[in-house]
Image (cartoon, rainbow, N blue to C red):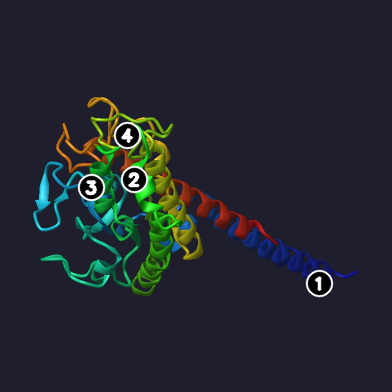
Amino acid sequence: MNHHMVRSGRTRRRRRATTLGATLGCGVLFLGAAAASPAAASGPHSPRGAKYVALGDSYTSGPLIPRQVDANCARSDQNYPSLVAAKWPTSTFTDVSCSGATTEEMWKPQGTNGPQLDALGHSTDLVTVQIGGNDVGFGSIIGTCAALSSKDPSGDPCRQYYNASGVDRLTVNILETAPKLARVLRAVHDRAPHARVLVVGYPDLLPDDGSGCYPSVPFAAGDFAYLRDVGKRLNLMMRTVAWFNRAEYVDTYKPTIGHDMCKAPADRWIEPLQPASPAAPAHPNAKGEAAMAQAVLKGLSRGDARQAKEKTTDVLRP
């Protein structure tokens, strides 16, 4: 073997070693970046500088909670979207939630509040949606059940009223609201195709154990459990519709158990029909809005961790 052949072999080995080292180095850097960088891990849903839009009804807007910043919609700057925006990295925050909104107000103006969906755009990164309670008839249900309670305070006149036809009318209302919510979510995805979408459920309004507190909350004893179950069915519908429409569901019911409108003023996060703290009747007070904000923030963090894990797994997969 001559010297020329030896030098040629060494040169080829050095080139292969250099090429292999560069390839491994790039792979290590790529894996390290994917594992360590939140931006790389979360992709288009990264919270860095997110453009956040909040859609919803009065449970979102926070009527009567100081400080009110929109009289037309009874919107507070201490509602849960505002608290989320203060904690979550956002570049812009737009809250178009409005008291009294139904799913129709996603497309229609409500006083000085334009169609809520108009706040969305291709650059929107994060959307929270809490809607459907007024479609089911929250306000009229509370008024009807309170009025009926005096006729039979120890019975269940409200349940009997809504079941007079042999079919529970409120369950039908919830089922009829499902396609309306699905339509809203499809429109959100159409207008904000890159956004992360969270459907926010409703909190626990009445004791989860079915007990009552008549007359401070003027429902008949047997109707507390009935109305509690109506709220649970509404949330179950929202969770299911979110799952079928590429949205995440945020459970605000479980975190608010034990702080319903029957509790003492110091312990409750939902005000009764005669509020002791600044809030609309049968609505969250400032503590309730803060609890819902915490639930949304936890949902956002869990989603980011899940996306990071999935993306890291994709990188490591052969």
Q: Amino acid at mark 4?
A: Asp
Residue bearing mark 3? 143
Residue lying furthest bottom: 190
Lower sequence index among marks 4 and 1: 1
Q: Say few, some or many: other residues with alpha carbon within 10 Å of mark 1 (under 14 / 14 to 19 / 20 or more).
A: few
Circle on res. 4: 1
Q: Amino acid at mark 1?
A: His
Q: Residue at x 33, y 58 (%)?
A: 136
Q: CA distance from mark 3 to mark 4?
A: 18 Å
Circle on res. 158: 2
Q: CA distance from mark 3 to mark 1?
A: 99 Å
183 or 158, which lies in front?
Answer: 158
Q: Secondary structure at mark 3?
A: helix
Residue bearing mark 4? 260
Q: Residue at x 38, y 63 (%)?
A: 177
Asked if residue 46 lies left or right of residue 64, the reply is right
